[in-house]
Image: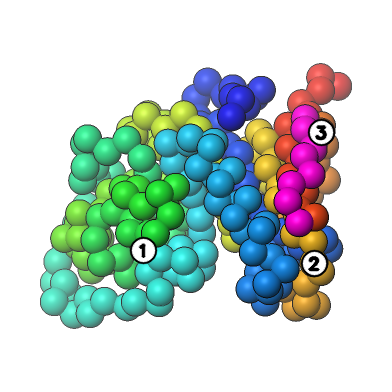
Amino acid sequence: MRESIQSPQDRPSVICHMGMSLDGKVTGDFLRLPQSEAALRAYYRIHREYGASAFACGRVTMEESFTRGFRPDLSRFAESFMPPMDHVADENAAFFAAAFDRHGSLGWKGSHIRDEDPGYDGAHIVEVLCESTPQACLSYLHEQGVSYIFAGKDDIDLPLALRKLRDIFGIRRLLLEGGSLLDGSFLRADLIDELSLVVFPVTAGGGDKPLFDNGVMSEFCLEEAQTLEEGVLWLRYRRSRRTR
């Protein structure tokens, strides 16, 4: 894959890589239709071909895709104290899963992603937290060998989080892969440099989530459009940053 045209100096280049229905939805039963299988294959193939050193998801997406709703027993950490200091658990890691998990509620069972797809398997987990994360959660993450950084007191400061991901872990290219809430937050903060959209040849249900929750008007320039197998379309856009 070609490098993103936008090359931020103080943060990773952010590529929002998403699969979506013809009507712009990114969640729902349409993902499980037989007609969506070719699009899913294309989505994961493109993810691998980007060769990014990290992918990022919000809490809900990480829970649905990787932790499967597991909730650990934190009672043994009730009296623990962990200062709100960034923690690097694996200094040799070169591939990362950044979990934007404001209060550290994800129930990881280890320090690395375990997945059948090599585009995700083996990624070292980095939790992006707020300083208000409960002490018990910090102790649990520490015990599991999960790295974590703090960015903001009660809400995540996205620019600060990205700077830390680059400075501490050396991440230069990051694939932003949902969900809708996190994608919308990145868009509003003007932190998306490129869009990579795999368009499924189906429409979604009325209650499914859009690409960007609470989005704003932004201008992107089409870089590439490819027609793939079985009616799947891949669109690449770069962020337009004209001088006004």
- For badge 1, the amino acid type reads Gly
Q: Is residue 36 left or right of residue 55?
A: right
Q: Which residues are magenta?
A: 223-230
Q: Can the viewer see residue 183?
A: no
Asked if 54 appears above or below 142 in the picture, the reply is: above
Frontmost of labels 1 and 2 is 2
Disc 3, SS: strand
Quadrant where the image shows the N terminus: top right
Q: Can the viewer see residue 109?
A: yes
User: Which tag, 1 or 2, sits closer to the chain's start?
Assistant: 1
Q: Which mark is residue 202?
A: 2
Q: Please tell me which residue lies in front, 23 or 88.
A: 23
Q: Is residue 111 left or right of residue 98?
A: left
Q: What residue is at 24 percent from the left and 61 percent from the top?
A: 110
Q: How many marks?
A: 3
Q: Main secondary structure of the magenta part?
A: strand
Q: Is residue 188 left or right of residue 11?
A: right
User: Which tag, 3 or 1, sits closer to the chain's start?
Assistant: 1
Q: Which residue in the structure is indicated by mark 3?
A: 222
Percent from the top left, x then y, of residue 52? 48, 36
Frontmost of labels 3 and 2 is 2
- For badge 3, the amino acid type reads Leu
Disc 1 and disc 2: Cα gap in Å? 35 Å
- For badge 2, the amino acid type reads Val
Quadrant where the image shows the C terminus: top right
Instruction: Say few, some or many: other residues with alpha carbon within 10 Å of mark 2 (under 14 / 14 to 19 / 20 or more).
Output: some
Percent from the top left, x then y, of residue 128? 40, 51
Q: Please tell me which residue lies in front, 181 or 84.
A: 181
Q: Is residue 151 left or right of residue 159?
A: left
Q: Which mark is residue 104?
A: 1
